[in-house]
Image (cartoon, grey):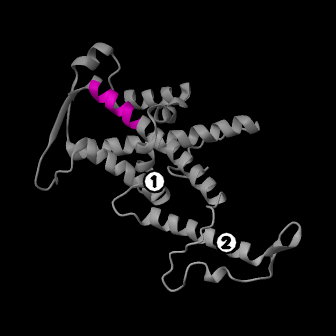
Amino acid sequence: MELFVKRAPKQVVDAMRQTVANMIGTLPPQFFSVNVTTVAENLAQLMYSVMMTGYMFRNAQYRLELQQSLEHIALPEPKDNMDVSDYAPGTQKKVTGEVIKWNKITGPEKMDAVKYIEFLESEVEELKRQVTRRSANGHNELLDYIKSLEPQNLKDLTNSAGEDVVFAMNAFVKRLLAVSDPAQMKIAVTQTTAPELANLLYWLMVVGYSIRNIEVRFDMERVLDSPPKLAELPPGEDI
């Protein structure tokens, strides 16, 4: 768990903690003792759902990072009116001449000075958007992205789970519950405290997130026809 917190993006860790807190509640354990009682069948469904949520978070993170990369490449159109109080709008563009930009492949390239200023302005605007996005108080970018998705797009975040993923998640649930008989699942009672359940759900969310990492790595190995590596990826490691 500590390794995951260190390596995973902060927004992922915060999203998981916020999700678990919303499920369990936020009563301070030093003042309130909350016990949770349910049958094994219900707990198994909850555990599987939480692992799939972690899987979904990883997929959402992939898409969000791709979207942000595309936004960075496609810089916004330059605006004539700059929000800078020290200068009158447009006065800094009343220049003539050319500037030289060095292309790493083709060498020096000439560019109109006004066009170059507009290019720099567009880069500044993009940086401002990034700073605003990252410094927004009380908002988690990953959760906001997930909430903005249409129902079908949200469903697509878990539809990519293959048979191996589903099998692995079910194996985790069976091993943790130590009950596999369907009849026993309906009557076996499980009781735990809210903090213990919260820790379990958080850990299972990390497991689901890591399973998606492993699935992507195995898919890449199959595509590249490289020998499989059986060692598990550390949680939160970028692929």
Q: Residue 199 in the image: x percent, y percent? A: 30, 46
Between 139 and 39, the one lying in front of the other is 139
Callout 1: helix, strand or loop? Answer: helix
Q: Amino acid at mark 2?
A: Glu
Residue behind mark 1 = 4
Quick one: which residue is furthest to the right in this view? 106
- Residue 108 vs 178, above or below: the answer is below
Residue 160 occupies which quadrant of the picture? top right
Residue behind mark 2 = 118
Q: Amino acid at mark 1?
A: Phe
Label 1 or label 2, whichever comes before in sequence order = 1
Between 1 and 56, the one lying in front of the other is 56
* Residue 32 lies within the magenta run: no
Q: Of the residues tagged 1 and 2, which is closer to the observer?
A: 2
Label 2 Cα crowd, 10 Å radius (few <14 / some 14-19 / many 20+): some
Between 205 and 119, the one lying in front of the other is 119
Q: Is residue 186 left or right of residue 117?
A: left
Is there any visible trace of residue 206 in the rendered image? no
Q: Residue 66 in the image: x percent, y percent? A: 60, 50
Q: Main secondary structure of the magenta part?
A: helix
- The tag on residue 163 is none
In the image, the segment drawn in magenta is 42-51
Q: Residue at 55% of width from left, 74% of height from top? A: 82
Q: Is residue 112 left or right of residue 236?
A: right
Callout 2: helix, strand or loop? Answer: helix
* Residue 49 lies within the magenta run: yes
Q: CA distance from mark 1 to mark 2?
A: 42 Å
Marks 1 and 2 close (CB-CB < 8 Å): no
Q: Residue 17 in the image: x percent, y percent? A: 34, 51
- Residue 13 vs 205, above or below: the answer is below
Quick one: which residue is furthest to the top in this view? 183
